Image (cartoon, grey):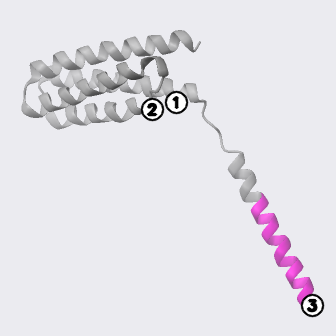
């Protein structure tokens, strides 16, 4: 009886582990290129959102939040040929955020527009080599 109980428990444990592991392996894996493209598009969208908020002279907190989100998204936009340019653009996002916080909308607007053009250029470079 003890032997039968041990066999049944072992069998149930093995079946549950097999079920669990098969669902883990069945999870959809994202393509690395898709992740990088989403990061680039998201970064560009957040910078554009920040530009609109700064131009309207609206909510400072919302503009800072959009810039912070762009800074987080750009971390996933990794491509060897544009890495240094991405780092410099990230530094410009820091400057733009500081300008928004200090209330210097003109400097923030100019910096954000320059950063936007850099990210668009980087995305074009990435897209050209990853068709």
Instruction: Locate residue 116, reporting x and y percent.
Output: 30, 17
Quadrant position of the C terminus in the picture: top right
Question: Is 15 covered by the magenta stretch?
Answer: yes
Mark 3 highlights which residue? 1
Q: Is residue 36 above or below residue 61?
A: above
Disc 1 is placed on an element classified as helix
Disc 3 is placed on an element classified as loop
Question: Is 48 covered by the magenta stretch?
Answer: no
Which of the two discs, 2 and 3, sits closer to the camera?
2
Which one is in front, 130 or 67?
130
Give the side of residue 59 with respect to residue 17, left or right.
left
Q: Which residue reaches farthest bottom?
A: 1
Circle 3 Cα neighbour tier, 10 Å, few/some/many (<14 / 14–19 / ≥20): few
- Location of residue 4 (image quadrant): bottom right
Q: Earlier in the sequence, mark 2 or mark 1?
A: 1
Q: Residue at x 48, y 22 (%)?
A: 79
Q: Is residue 33 visible?
A: yes
Q: Residue at x 23, y 20 (%)?
A: 112
Circle 2 Cα neighbour tier, 10 Å, few/some/many (<14 / 14–19 / ≥20): some
Q: Is residue 35 above or below residue 44?
A: below
Magenta stretch: helix, strand or loop mostly: helix
Residues at circles 2 and 1 in contact by the CB criterion of under 8 Å: yes
Give the side of residue 51 with respect to residue 37, left or right.
left
Q: Which mark is residue 126?
A: none
Instruction: Locate residue 9, reporting x and y percent.
Output: 82, 77
Q: Is residue 114 above or below residue 23?
A: above
Report the span colored magenta.
Answer: 2-18
Q: CA distance from mark 1 to mark 3?
A: 55 Å
Mark 2 highlights which residue? 76
Mark 1 highlights which residue? 35
């Amino acid at each position: 009886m003890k032997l039968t109980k041990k066999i049944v428990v072992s069998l149930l444990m093995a079946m549950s582990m097999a079920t669990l592991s098969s669902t883990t392996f069945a999870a959809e894996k994202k393509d690395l290129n898709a992740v990088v493209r989403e990061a680039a598009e998201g970064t560009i969208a957040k910078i554009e959102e920040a530009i609109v908020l700064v131009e309207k002279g609206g909510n400072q907190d919302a503009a800072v939040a959009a810039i912070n989100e762009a800074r987080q998204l750009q971390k996933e936009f990794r491509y060897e040929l544009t890495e240094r340019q991405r780092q410099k653009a990230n530094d410009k996002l820091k400057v733009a955020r500081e300008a928004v916080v200090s209330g210097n909308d003109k400097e923030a607007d100019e910096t954000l527009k320059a950063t936007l053009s850099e990210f668009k250029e980087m995305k074009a470079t990435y897209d050209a080599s990853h068709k």
